[in-house]
Image (cartoon, grey):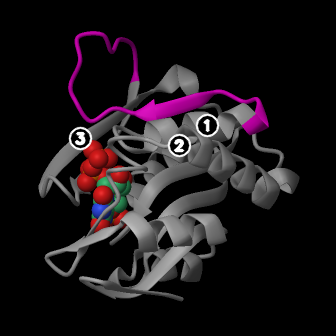
């Protein structure tokens, strides 16, 4: 998506070789007009997949999933990382290693929000090693729901998670794939 790539070039900052900071428009302060266009683009890409639900993971995926759901008119479910007194009933759980916090979380989704006849579109802001996605896919499998597609805003291609999941057979569409990056120089695939 050209507009997203141009914004990354304009406002993205490379940190420690492996971290791309886009917190001025994507995952801290958020440019809602851009997020709306991102949602429309995911709808265009996955419009033939009969999506019944969008699944994401807190925190940074939520806004993008919601802006995408506006174009599909389906509910959003987000996997929770924090243990909450508010979670009741039976839960699907999976273990996820968080990239930016460098710690493991037991993510949870209430069983009542994913059914075996759901066709799920999984949405997230970033794909790095694919650990968050592995956890979300695991939860879909536990629910016997179909993973109909995976939509990512920014994939860091050099970290391999996206290509591994494509090889596993998932339909994964990333709006921008960063092939290499260093301060002041970002190259897209
Ligand atoms: O492909 P991976 O290696 O799993 O990396 C991608 C994940 O990392 C980030 O989550 P993180 O837990 O770091 O932070 P967040 O709370 O901002 O979502 C991002 O939002 C993705 O969910
Ligand atoms: O803001 C972010 N920048 C990154 O490089 C990244 N990788 C995973 N998750 C990420 N979030």
Going by the picture, which residue comes out furthest to the front?
Answer: 10
Which picture quadrant has residue 173? Answer: bottom right
Q: Is residue 146 visible?
A: no
The segment highlighted magenta reads 71-90
Residue 159 appears at what percent x and percent y? 33, 81
Distance between mark 2 and mark 3 Cα atoms: 22 Å
SS at badge 1: helix
Residue pictured at 56% horizontal, 24% vertical: 113
Q: Mark 1: is the Cβ under 8 angstroms from ligand 1?
A: no
Crowding near the residue tagged with mark 1, few <14, some 14–19, many ≥20 C-alpha atoms within 10 Å: many
Q: Which residue is mark 3?
A: 106
Crowding near the residue tagged with mark 3, few <14, some 14–19, many ≥20 C-alpha atoms within 10 Å: some
Is 116 covered by the magenta stretch? no
Distance between mark 3 and mark 1 Cα atoms: 26 Å
SS at badge 3: strand
Q: Which mark is residue 23?
A: none
Name the side, left or right, on which 129 lies relative to 171. left
Residue 18, relative to residue 42: is it above or below? below
Q: Quadrant of the C terminus?
A: bottom right
Residue 28 appears at what percent x and percent y? 32, 42
Crowding near the residue tagged with mark 2, few <14, some 14–19, many ≥20 C-alpha atoms within 10 Å: many
Residue 86, relative to residue 118: is it above or below? above
Q: Which mark is residue 67?
A: 1
Distance between mark 2 and mark 1 Cα atoms: 5 Å
Mark 3 or mark 1, earlier in chain: 1
- Residues at circles 3 and 1 in contact by the CB criterion of under 8 Å: no
Residue 91 appears at what percent x and percent y? 39, 27
């Amino acid at each position: 998506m050209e507009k997203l790539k141009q914004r990354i070039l304009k406002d993205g900052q490379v940190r420690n070789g492996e971290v791309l900071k886009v917190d001025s428009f994507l995952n801290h302060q958020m440019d809602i007009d851009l997020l709306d266009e991102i949602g429309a683009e995911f709808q265009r890409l996955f419009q033939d997949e009969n999506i019944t639900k969008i699944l994401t993971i807190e925190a940074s995926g939520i806004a993008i999933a919601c802006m995408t759901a506006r174009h599909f008119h389906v509910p959003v479910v987000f996997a929770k990382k924090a243990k909450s007194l508010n979670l009741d009933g039976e839960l699907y759980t999976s273990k996820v290693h968080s990239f930016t916090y460098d710690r493991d979380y037991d993510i949870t989704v209430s069983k009542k929000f994913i059914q075996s006849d759901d066709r799920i579109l999984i949405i997230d802001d970033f794909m790095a090693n694919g650990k968050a996605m592995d956890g979300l896919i695991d939860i879909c499998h536990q629910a016997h729901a179909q993973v109909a597609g995976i939509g990512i805003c920014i994939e860091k291609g050099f970290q391999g998670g996206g290509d591994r999941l494509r090889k596993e057979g998932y339909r994964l569409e990333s709006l921008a794939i960063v092939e290499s990056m260093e301060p002041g120089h970002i190259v897209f695939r």
